[in-house]
Amino acid sequence: MTLPPQAPLSILDLSPVPSGGTAGDALRNTLDLARQAERLGYRRYWVAEHHFAPGVASSAPAVLIGLIAAATSTIRVGSGAVQLGHQTPLAVVEQFGLIDALHPGRLDLGIGRSGQRRAELAKQTTPPADPPQERVVDGLLIPKPFDFSKLVTHPQLAHHATLLQQPGARTPDFAAQIDDVLAFLAGTHEAHAVPGEGADLQVWILGSSGGQSAQVAGERGLPFAANYHVSPASVLEAVEAYREAFKPSAELAEPYVLVSADAVVAEDEATARELASPYALWVRSIRTGAGAMPFPTPAEAAAHTWTGADRELVRDRVDTQFVGTPEQVAERLRVLRRVTGADELLVTTITHDHADRVRSYELLAEAWNRT
């Protein structure tokens, strides 16, 4: 595979709530960062969908995307991702169609199936017989897989899942839901979405493995976003499955892959590592079932007493976070791109202080554009 000399950079924002801050602070920071991203030349600005997380304010992507689109003028804005396990294809198309009516041609509808995936994992009774071990592929760390089945069976998370749907609701097959989304947009569905039908949306599928998400994206000729920053162990499996399943469509003649990465950049490596030091504690809060905590300060993170089990719980995420100077992080992103064959990279950065996060993206953009 021959890659062009450079790839666009985009941003994934979780609207993190800093320790001592509020959801309002987080959302105002998101709007400011989106404006800065536009100024710095990032291609897309995506927001995620998270629920029951004290430290994450992005619970309603369509609402937040509407606010971001109104606060910017040229950058593409979208979801990374809307979870179809929580709402119907019609509702999603109407929401994004409404925003497109006011901001035409700038929206990415990124769709995920994590709600369905969690339900599948919860039904697993035994772990894989021979899970892969950590390895390095052409300079890229591929850690051993994290066992999500233990997390999704957490009683509190199971209860939360019941609150995200109406009682007795049944989620249809993911492929059928995607077909409904595409039909509503194209006007070929028996019912008509208004607004929504004919909306100039770019539909993406997001996936963390070589399973159904990658298959559906490939078979329907849609662009695919693979998740290195949350599931680094399976990123190569995901992009390979997508490319193998790909069939040309009216949207794409060839596969188009975006790959995500966590990164923190500062003028010197020591400062970058200090800014990134709360990340492990933040990931721990997610993986213990408590939900993402407000992002700590470096001092708050340093006060935590770690056990060996705690460190193992977060090791794959910490070891695959790209932290350092602009040149160091840009080089690690080049490795990620080379190994995955990514056409575009999606960077997510969390620091306690908003100014540090803006500066991280600024330094990264400058270094990336120099190479």
Image (cartoon, rainbow, N blue to C red):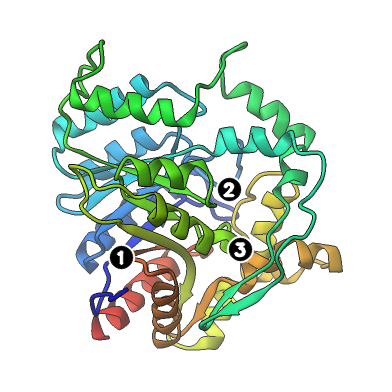
Question: Residue, x 20% and y 54% (percent of image)?
Answer: 75
Which disc, if any, is residue 343?
A: 1
* C-alpha distance separating marks 1 and 2: 31 Å
Residue 18 coordinates in the image, percent (x, y): 55, 55
| N-terminal-most mark, 3 or 2 | 2
Q: Which residue is mark 2?
A: 55
| Left or right: where 21 falls relative to 293 | left
* Nearest the eye: 82 or 60: 82
Residue 257 coordinates in the image, percent (x, y): 35, 59
- As shown in the figure, which amino acid type bears the numbered disc 2? Gly
Is residue 10 shown above or below 181?
A: below
- Tell me the mark number nearer the camera, choosing from 3 and 2: 3
Question: Residue, x 28% and y 31% (percent of image)?
Answer: 96
Whether residue 364 is visible: yes
Question: Residue, x 22% and y 43% (percent of image)?
Answer: 249
| N-terminal-most mark, 3 or 1 | 3
Whether residue 48 is visible: no
Q: Residues within 10 Å of mark 3 (few under 14, many from 20)?
A: many
Is residue 363 shown above or below 197?
A: below
* Nearest the eye: 74 or 105: 105
Q: Secondary structure at mark 3?
A: helix
- As shown in the figure, which amino acid type bears the numbered disc 3? Ala
Which disc, if any, is residue 233?
A: 3
